[in-house]
Image (cartoon, rainbow, N blue to C red):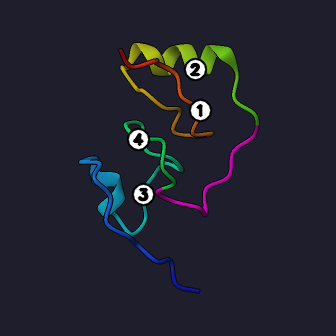
Amino acid sequence: MSIVRTLNPCDNMNHRRHNAPVGHCPQCGGIVNARITVGACTESKHAAARRQQSIFCVDCGEQLVVRR
């Protein structure tokens, strides 16, 4: 099975990795590793990601911060 990579305007390096350690990009929310599956995220996990200044959750891809 081959994963097709397309050009992405996001500058996060996870898009360029063949085996990214996270499922979703923290900057754009795009899927970077479809092989990673996680259970349901919790609000405390999302709060910790916000403190790390992630815009999107790396596990579920949900937008955490609204850009202004």
Q: To which residue does mark 2 refer?
A: 46
Picture disc at residue 20:
3
Callout 1: SS: loop
Callout 4: SS: loop
Picture disc at residue 62:
1
Residue sitting at 48 percent across and 42 percent down? Answer: 29
Picture disc at residue 53:
none
Q: Earlier in the sequence, mark 2 or mark 1?
A: 2
Q: Earlier in the sequence, mark 4 or mark 1?
A: 4
Q: Quadrant of residue 7?
A: bottom left
- Residue 52 position in % (x across, y down): 38, 20
Give the Cα distance between marks 2 and 3. 20 Å
Residue 18 sits above or below residue 49 on the image: below
The quadrant in which the C terminus is found is: top left
Residue 15 sits above or below residue 46 on the image: below
Q: Earlier in the sequence, mark 4 or mark 2?
A: 4
Which label lies toward us, 2 or 1?
A: 1
Which label lies toward us, 1 or 3?
A: 1
The reply, left or right, for residue 35 in relation to residue 42 is left
**Crowding at label 2, few (<14), some or many (≥20) Cα neighbours within 10 Å?**
many
In the image, 68 versus 26, the foreground residue is: 68
Q: To which residue does mark 4 refer?
A: 28
The quadrant in which the N terminus is found is: bottom right
